[in-house]
Image: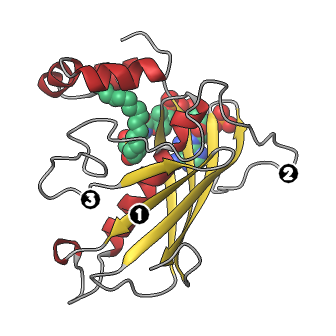
Amino acid sequence: MSRPSSLTPSPDVEVPGPHPSAPPPGTELGEHYDGCFGCGEELENGLRLRTRVGEGVSVDTEFVVGPGHQGAPGLAHGGLLSCAFDEALGALGYLLHQPAVTARLETDFKRPVPVGSTLFIHAWCTGVEGRKIYAKAVGRLNAPDGPVAVEAASLFVAVGFEHFMSNGRPEDVRRAMQNPDVVKAARAFEVNP
Ligand SMILES: CCCCCCCC/C=C\CCCCCCCC(=O)SCCNC(=O)CCNC(=O)[C@H](O)C(C)(C)COP(=O)(O)OP(=O)(O)OC[C@H]1O[C@@H](n2cnc3c(N)ncnc32)[C@H](O)[C@@H]1OP(=O)(O)O
């Protein structure tokens, strides 16, 4: 099936503000699920990213690149950098109070990212059209105003909670639903698990 390739919304699209009950700027969002490779706090080999709410529908995420994240010797693996961006962009759904999944993610690698560096990722929503949530992100080296190393653009598609319930491996879904934090995350989206 052919898909439109653009990751840019129509010029007249509305750029939404945060949902009235979205957490205020500065709030740390915490993990949305302990098995998440991007944000799971206890996941041994995960990225363990922490994300803070920014102004409007935006977030800031820091990725500390460690020796377990290498592609070439001493340099971050591009796929893991894309993963960090997927996580940061996905967190915008919290501010819109809308569960959503990545449909497209485009990543531009502009500079090498060495092990030991911190990538400061800023992600923001650029528009919502029906179920389609457009967003962009930029990653800067070692400081929020450091040189740009990575840029990303994405299209997320809004889904209902049943997307996770009916597509996830049943034992993982059952285990997740026993975790009060996941139930709390689901409630934060005002969906009924
Ligand atoms: C029980 C416990 C649960 C715990 C959970 C707690 C809450 C957590 C909530 C949130 C966590 C956030 C976590 C962030 C982590 C990172 C996010 C990820 O990595 S997500 C994983 C990777 N992504 C997928 O697995 C998607 C797989 N794809 C799909 O499921 C479908 O393709 C889906 C939902 C994306 C679309 O399918 P359709 O059938 O619902 O809808 P259609 O009609 O195809 O698309 C809707 C519109 O979007 C466009 N579209 C869809 N895909 C497109 C594409 N690839 N490129 C361009 N446009 C596309 C279409 O053209 C259509 O546009 P027009 O409305 O007609 O204008």
Residue 177 in view (yes/no): yes
Colour style of the rendered protein structure: secondary structure
Q: Which of 138/49 is in front?
A: 49
* Relative side of 4 to 103, left or right: right
Q: Secondary structure at mark 1?
A: strand
Q: Secondary structure at mark 2?
A: loop
Q: Which residue is mark 3?
A: 47
Q: Quadrant of residue 132?
A: top right
Name which residue lies at 77% across and 43% down. 15
Residue 11: image tag: 2
The image shows residue 101 at horizontal and vertical percentages of 45, 39
Residue 54: image tag: none
Name which residue lies at 32% across and 41% down. 31
* Relative side of 4 to 38, left or right: right
Tag 1: amino acid: Glu
Q: Nearer the viewer, mark 3 or mark 1?
A: 1
When the figure is inspected, residue 137 is found, relative to residue 133, above or below; the finding is: below
Distance CA(mark 2)–CA(mark 1) = 31 Å
Q: Quadrant of residue 156?
A: top right
Disc 1 residue crowd, few under 14, some 14–19, many 20+, Cα 10 Å: many
The image shows residue 171 at horizontal and vertical percentages of 12, 23
Q: Secondary structure at mark 3?
A: loop
Residue 2 in view (yes/no): no
Name which residue lies at 82% across and 42% down. 13
Tag 2: amino acid: Pro
Q: Which residue is mark 1?
A: 62
Of the residues under marks 3 and 2, which one precedes in the sequence? 2
The image shows residue 186 at horizontal and vertical percentages of 39, 21
Residue at disc 1, CB closer than 8 Å to ligand 1: no
